[in-house]
Image (cartoon, grey):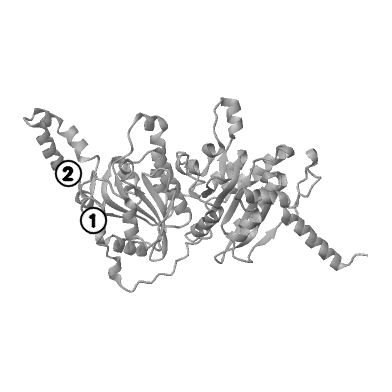
């Protein structure tokens, strides 16, 4: 006759079977590929001893293709909750050693259940993805499992931060959940994302390509923009999650935690180096990241989407310990002009910051929207409008610093006063105008230049006339479009003051179901 201890022993036996996943042989194969198991990933990511597993004994309900003939406890995914640096998180980690991490009916419902708990408790949700896609053996019920997850990704978007880490293949329907989440991290050489794999593409189109060249970390970080970070290995990828969370609140009803900050000498906020970083000659390039690092707390800048659309720089930083979001033109690439990809990149980041109460600071040095047939036919009008929409919609504190050029529609789009900026500062060398002096002079003074005995000399004179009369910050300041023209060396001081003044900002928008951003 069995007693309680026998039942307890049975419990631990079943738990050990569940923890084995697909068994020792498959675990060894996982390690041979340079990949950790689902549970090893969770152990590294979470604070020691904090993980609490949920639905350990869920199994698939399939009977076809001998699916019920082997251990399937957990159904290829580990779910639960724990803490990262003392903060609660909910998460799932797909187990590639069991069914190749493929998603079936119960696998999907298991993820959906833990997502619901994350939302009910208002804490971040993390997905560790390692999946071959839908579980074909289960038929259409696997698609329902995906739908359960996609739906929750969507309705919880903007309520709790959602982070996806791609740690192996992510094929077919498996790619759409990460695409809806806020941030995607990929691991070099061991992670890929694609809707249709290389073999299918070759069969249908005749094109040959490797998995890595089709959907590897480098491709999605630099070309498609589907991923925000890439890591050399799994350890680095999980460290990125920890770092990223340190800038974010738990949910949209909170503000990010303030990091302890000590500064005894106020003169430290005075940054004389800023005078030399930005060339006075408006045609010379420079690295806007040097400006950023002078203005924010030391070593606090954390760039997002670093390899994609490099003509715009976005990322988190801290000013006196408080999280801010930065959107900055990068004159090193395309002269800082706005194109299709940079418009999408900026708009998405702006909207994330607005969702989670993160003030926005814009450093502006822009010649305009990038010209060209390819851009026009690719929809630059629609994509550029996303920046206008995102800034206009945002109700967080919004500050702009015009570092050098601010021309045309791009000036308006990049958080101008007319679309809702709370504070706009300009450096004394700023050129704020409908277009650059060179182009404007060629149009306005075309007849005078053509009739001149020395057209080039006359052209230069007219350029200087236009620059002095129109392309300077004081005209905009007279009209209230610039709140103050500031000494560049005092930029950090002005931002500290501005953020403090706006710390209790409240702004409402007309009540509506939602807007219709020009996607």
Question: What residue would you read off at disc 2?
Answer: 467
Q: Say which quarter of the image contains residue 54.
A: bottom right
Q: For marks 1 and 2, give the one nearer the viewer.
A: 1
In the image: residue 349, left or right of residue 332: right
Q: Residue 462: x and y, percent?
A: 13, 38
Tag of residue 276? 1
Position of the N terminus by quadrant: bottom right
How crowded pointer 2 is (Cα within 10 Å; few <14, some 14-19, many 20+) is rated as some
How crowded pointer 1 is (Cα within 10 Å; few <14, some 14-19, many 20+) is rated as few
Q: Is residue 518 visible?
A: yes
Q: Of residues 319 and 133, which is closer to you in this image?
A: 133
Tag of residue 495? none
Q: Determine the secondary structure under disc 2.
A: helix
- Give me the C-alpha separation between circle 1 and circle 2: 22 Å
Q: Residue 498: x and y, percent?
A: 33, 61
Q: Determine the secondary structure under disc 1.
A: helix
Q: Residue 93: x and y, percent?
A: 63, 52
> Residue 405, relative to residue 46: is it above or below?
above
Name the residue furthest left.
453
Residue plotted at (61% across, 38% down): 172
In the image: residue 323, left or right of residue 213: left
In the image: residue 49, left or right of residue 431: right
> Residue 98, relative to residue 118: is it above or below?
above
Q: Is residue 159 visible?
A: no
Q: Of residues 228 and 459, which is closer to you in this image?
A: 228
- Circles 1 and 2, Cβ within 8 Å, touching? The answer is no
């Amino acid at each position: 006759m069995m007693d309680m201890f026998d039942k307890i022993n049975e419990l631990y036996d079943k738990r050990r079977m569940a923890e084995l996943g697909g068994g020792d042989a498959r675990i060894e194969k996982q390690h041979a590929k340079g990949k950790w198991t689902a549970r090893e990933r969770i152990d590294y990511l979470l604070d020691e001893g904090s993980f609490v597993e949920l639905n350990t004994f869920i199994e698939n309900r399939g009977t076809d293709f001998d699916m019920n003939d082997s251990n399937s406890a957990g159904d290829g995914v580990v779910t639960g909750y724990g803490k990262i640096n003392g903060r609660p998180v909910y998460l799932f980690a797909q187990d590639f050693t069991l069914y190749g991490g493929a998603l079936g009916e119960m696998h999907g419902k298991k993820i959906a259940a833990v997502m619901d708990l994350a939302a009910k408790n208002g804490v971040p949700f993390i997905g560790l993805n390692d999946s071959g896609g839908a579980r074909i053996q289960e038929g259409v019920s696997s698609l329902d499992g995906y739908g359960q997850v996609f739906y929750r990704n969507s309705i919880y978007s903007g309520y709790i931060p959602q982070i996806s880490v791609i740690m192996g293949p992510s094929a077919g329907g498996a790619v759409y959940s990460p695409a809806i989440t806020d941030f995607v991290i990929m691991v070099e050489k061991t992670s890929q994302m694609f809707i249709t794999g290389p073999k299918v593409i070759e069969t249908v189109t005749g094109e040959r390509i490797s998995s890595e060249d089709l959907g590897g970390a480098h491709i999605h970080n630099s070309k498609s923009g589907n991923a925000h970070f890439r890591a050399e290995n799994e350890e680095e990828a999980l460290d990125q999650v920890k770092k990223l969370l340190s800038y974010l609140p738990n949910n949209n009803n909170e503000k990010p935690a303030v990091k302890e900050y000590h500064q005894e000498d106020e003169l430290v906020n005075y940054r004389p180096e800023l005078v030399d970083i930005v060339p006075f000659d408006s045609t010379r390039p420079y690295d806007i990241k040097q400006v950023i690092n002078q203005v924010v707390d030391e070593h606090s800048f954390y760039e997002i989407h670093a390899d994609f659309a490099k003509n715009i720089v976005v990322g988190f930083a801290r000013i006196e310990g408080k999280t801010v979001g930065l959107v900055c033109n990068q004159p090193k690439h395309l002269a800082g002009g706005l194109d299709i990809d940079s418009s999408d990149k900026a708009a998405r980041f702006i909207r994330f910051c607005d969702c989670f109460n993160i003030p926005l600071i814009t450093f502006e040095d822009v010649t305009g929207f990038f010209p060209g047939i390819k851009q026009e036919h690719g929809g630059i009008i629609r994509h550029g409008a996303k920046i206008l929409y995102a800034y206009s919609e945002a109700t967080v504190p919004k500050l702009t610093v015009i570092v050098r050029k601010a021309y045309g529609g791009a000036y308006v789009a990049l958080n101008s006063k007319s679309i809702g900026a709370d504070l706009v500062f300009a450096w004394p060398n700023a050129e704020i105008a409908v277009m650059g002096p060179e182009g404007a002079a060629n149009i306005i003074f075309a007849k005078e230049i053509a009739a001149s005995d020395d057209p080039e000399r006359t052209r230069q004179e007219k350029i200087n006339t236009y620059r002095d009369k129109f392309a300077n910050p004081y005209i905009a300041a007279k009209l209230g479009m610039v709140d103050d023209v500031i000494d560049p060396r005092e930029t950090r001081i002005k931002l500290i003051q501005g953020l403090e003044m706006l710390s209790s900002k409240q702004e409402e928008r007309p009540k509506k179901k939602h807007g219709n951003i020009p996607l």
